[in-house]
């Protein structure tokens, strides 16, 4: 006797197609499919879609490997031995000490950016000029999302797609400072 | 779906080795997950060139942020979340989904029967893909991630910032809509 309903079977159809069902699940799904033409049609649809699974073009993987290798080299550029006072702290592989160094490395430029940004804000709102018109920004924020489009946020700015100060190179950081000062 | 299995070590071990400075571990992770990252990017961008760009940017961001991967989710889910947001970032910067370019029409009498047959098969398959592309983003992603990547509803939910139940609803609405579109032909 087969107790599986359509909803349960349809949940499992992708796993059936991937061969990822347990023997018990497989028996239940197979039993249901023999008597349900609609679920069989959905399985066929999944098969047609899976057959057209988009694959990367030739060269695409190599491009990603090269980009990753370059990013990895950049990431470990600052993980060499670092002198602190009279001693030398071995810094490879990247560990707690290198994070301390990394934090120190960015703390001063980050503080400078913060001070300049705060100063600019005070000048902007403290002057006699009229405050900027933010109507357009508010309207944009209040506008309904386009069909199906959403920008998903997460706690981690990297996962959420946000810019992070660490992403900036020394040159980019200097350019940002110059831009803020000008 | 093709996975190059050059190494059987789990992702979490490779991530730890990458943190410890082993470049080979990074390369293995890229080879293992590149196709999934690419497909997720294509599902959002609808363009192969942009998806290539997004895939490269995804790995660059992930490598820079390796220390922030805490293992709360599977590494692949974390990576695909970055891919989805990189792709959305490209869309947000005004590089909207492109339509497929029109192919030059062959001259009359020049058709090779084999080529015509292959084109007919490709056209039917492309029809299903086009229908998938016409779904709203959450439904499109839910269907793509379930069928192409074999992700669970919980993992799909993590990727589209929804509950497991909402991911299930998006998947089933998407599949039902695809079925209707196919039946209408």
Image (spheres, rainbow, N blue to C red):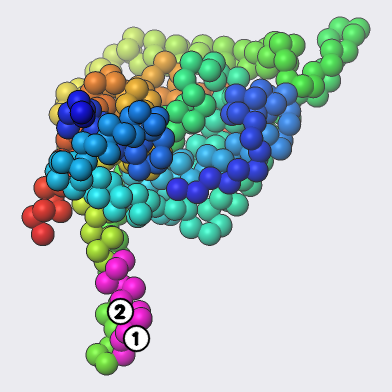
Q: Please name the residue that numbered disc 2 is placed on.
A: B116
Using the numbered discs, state the Cα–Cα distance from disc 1 to disc 2 in whole angstroms: 6 Å
Q: Nearer the viewer, residue A96 or A134?
A: A96
Whether residue B112 is in magenta: the answer is: yes
The picture places residue A126, in percent across and down from the top left corner, at: 34, 9
Picture quadrant of residue B90: top left
Residue at 73%, 20% (x, y): give it.
A94
Relative horizontal placement of residue B173, taking residue B85 as reference (left or right): left
- Pinpoint the chain carrying mark 1: B
- Pinpoint the chain carrying mark 2: B
Relative horizontal placement of residue A112, taking residue A80 as reference (left or right): left
Q: Nearer the viewer, residue A90 or B146?
A: B146
Relative horizontal placement of residue A28, taking residue B87 as reference (left or right): left
Residue at 14%, 45% (x, y): give it.
A37
Q: Please name the residue that numbered disc 1 is placed on.
A: B112
Contact flag, marks 1 and 2 (Cβ < 8 Å): yes
The picture places residue A129, in percent across and down from the top left corner, at: 28, 18
* Residue B90 in view (yes/no): no
Identify the mark at residue A130; answer none if there is no mark.
Answer: none
Picture quadrant of residue A173: top right
Q: Which residues are magenta?
A: B110-122
Q: Nearer the viewer, residue B18 or A90?
A: B18
Determine crowd level at label 1: few under 14, some 14-19, many 20+ residues with C-alpha closer than 10 A. few
Q: Nearer the viewer, residue A46 or B79?
A: A46
Of all residues shown, which one is farthest toward the bottom?
B109
In the figure, A23 relative to B57: above or below? above
Of all residues shown, which one is farthest toward the front?
A1
């Amino acid at each position: 006797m087969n107790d599986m309903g359509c909803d349960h079977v349809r949940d499992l159809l992708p796993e059936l197609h991937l061969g990822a069902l347990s023997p018990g699940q497989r028996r239940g799904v197979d039993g249901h499919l023999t008597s349900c033409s609609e679920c069989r049609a959905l399985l066929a649809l999944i098969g047609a879609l899976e057959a057209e699974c988009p694959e990367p073009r030739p060269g695409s993987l190599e491009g990603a490997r090269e980009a990753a290798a370059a990013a990895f080299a950049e990431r470990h550029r600052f993980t060499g031995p670092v002198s602190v006072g009279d001693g030398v702290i071995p810094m490879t592989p990247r560990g707690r000490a290198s994070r301390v160094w990394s934090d120190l490395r960015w703390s001063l430029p980050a503080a400078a950016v913060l001070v300049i940004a705060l100063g600019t804000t005070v000048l902007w709102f403290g002057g006699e000029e009229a405050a900027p018109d933010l109507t357009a920004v508010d309207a944009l924020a209040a506008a309904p999302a386009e069909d199906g489009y959403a920008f998903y946020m997460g706690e981690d700015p990297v996962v959420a797609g946000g810019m992070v100060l660490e992403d900036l190179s020394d040159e980019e950081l200097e350019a940002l400072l110059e831009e803020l000062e000008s | 779906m093709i996975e190059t299995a050059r190494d059987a070590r789990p992702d979490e071990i490779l991530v730890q080795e990458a943190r410890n400075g082993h470049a080979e571990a990074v390369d293995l992770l890229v080879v293992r997950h590149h196709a999934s990252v690419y497909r997720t990017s294509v599902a959002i961008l609808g363009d192969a060139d942009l998806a290539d760009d997004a895939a490269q940017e995804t790995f660059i961001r992930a490598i820079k942020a390796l220390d922030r991967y805490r293992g709360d989710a599977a590494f692949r889910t974390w990576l695909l979340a970055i891919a989805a947001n990189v792709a959305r970032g490209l869309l947000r910067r005004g590089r909207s989904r492109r339509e497929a370019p029109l192919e030059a029409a062959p001259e009359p009498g020049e058709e090779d029967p084999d080529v015509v047959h292959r084109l007919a098969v490709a056209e039917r398959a492309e029809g299903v893909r086009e229908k998938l592309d016409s779904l709203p983003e959450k439904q499109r992603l839910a269907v793509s991630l379930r069928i192409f990547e074999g992700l669970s509803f919980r993992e799909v939910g993590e990727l589209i910032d929804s509950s497991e139940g909402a991911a299930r609803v998006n998947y089933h609405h998407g599949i039902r809509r695809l079925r209707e579109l196919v039946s209408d032909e």
